[in-house]
Amino acid sequence: MIRVGVIGCGNIGGVHAGILKEINQTELCAMADIQIERAREYSARFTEGNGAVYESMEKMLEEEDLHVIHICTPHNCHVPMAVKALKKGMDVFMEKPPAISREQFQELLKASKESPGRLGICFQNRYNETTRKVSELLDEGSLGRIKGARAFVTWHRDAPYYTESGWRGKLETEGGGALINQSIHALDLLLSWLGKPVWTEATMRNHHLKEIVEVEDTLEAYMVFTEGPEPVSASFYATTAYVADAPVFLELVCEYGFVRLEGTSVWYQKAEDEEPVIWRAPKTAIPGKAYWGNGHQACIQDFYDCLESGRAYANDLGSAENTFYTMMDIYDSARNEER
Ligand SMILES: NC(=O)c1ccc[n+]([C@@H]2O[C@H](COP(=O)([O-])OP(=O)(O)OC[C@H]3O[C@@H](n4cnc5c(N)ncnc54)[C@H](O)[C@@H]3O)[C@@H](O)[C@H]2O)c1
């Protein structure tokens, strides 16, 4: 059995712990949270009280002989924690974002290269059935080349979501808002199909919680992927000031038709004279919120299958590089616009 510890027993840590309980290869041995009562509650809920509880990752690593840790803590903790574990040669599965600054990303890259431990990043939406369907349609080739794309993430986050967490809404701990936290997955998918932008321009605002958060609640970006007479571009819009959590919308306009992903559906048309087709992902009992997908289980299971077999894990740090640096470029452009 692979001995695992979870750090950060809040909202998403429970999704990880629940999945670790179900996976055949893993034993959830320990959990850590600075709010130790949360770790105790996890131990009771996911290990019938058998899992050890700690107030810090450091203490947990000192006391326990673990193979893997899952990092489910606030954004600013991801890199310091991952680096510590990688330096001990451990395997690490880390929630998004991979870092909150370029310096942090470089530090993580160095630690990852120097460690025998493996690092997986939780970009679970890559495993969604809808994502695979879009990739399949593009790979088939009949849609032709991608001419452009758009993405919309329109969600609702209210004041308590920030004030009750202690870390959200602050630049120092969250690193940003609607982009780095809520819509990084949509950006990641868009870039997986379009590649690396050669030009990025963006603006951002805080519309609805001005006195409460210092990060953006709304951001738009224009990205150009190839220049020349027929440039390939994408329009990206993310907000947490909407009235509801609407399903994520992504569209790729191609040479001969289009493909649109909205929530659990994919809508496509391969030629102008063909009827559009609506494909719906099969209903599933796997946990996950409808508006951000239920890819966690497949993403985490694949990580352990890779550890066991020695196969390379697709969601490694290298695979996150384009998304991370494009996100930082978008923020730089938006911050310049603000001045
Ligand atoms: N992949 C996804 O779709 C997805 C969804 C939700 C959250 N997340 C990510 O998961 C992470 C956690 O988000 P959340 O919503 O669960 O936050 P949360 O506030 O609900 O949970 C974080 C927990 O970490 C604990 N913590 C803080 N500092 C700590 C430290 N130094 N040591 C140990 N524990 C510490 C807090 O006490 C809290 O219990 C974030 O990086 C977030 O972006 C990812």
Image (cartoon, grey):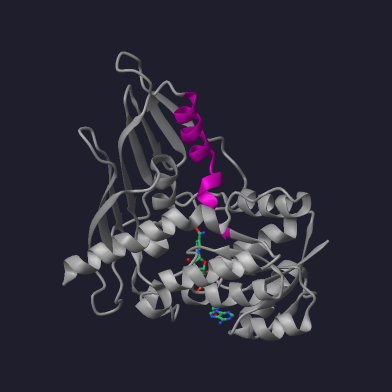
Question: Horizontally, is 24 left or right of 148 in the view?
Answer: right
When asked about the image quadrant of residue 161, the answer is bottom left
Q: Main secondary structure of the magenta part?
A: helix
Indicate whether 55 appears above or below 47: below
Q: Position of residue 80 (x, y in %)?
A: 55, 77
Q: Position of residue 60 (x, y in %)?
A: 71, 81
Q: Residue furthest right?
A: 1
Indicate whether 337 appears above or below 143: below
Question: Horizontally, is 94 left or right of 59 in the view?
Answer: left
Residue 75 visible, this angle: yes
Q: Position of residue 130 (x, y in %)?
A: 49, 38
Q: Position of residue 294 (x, y in %)?
A: 55, 49
**Residue at horizontal 37%, vertical 54%?**
245
Q: Is 255 or 236 nearer to us in this picture? A: 255
Q: Is residue 239 magenta?
A: no
Question: Horizontally, is 4 left or right of 80 in the view?
Answer: right
Instruction: Give the magenta range.
Output: 121-140
**Residue at horizontal 34%, vertical 35%?**
252
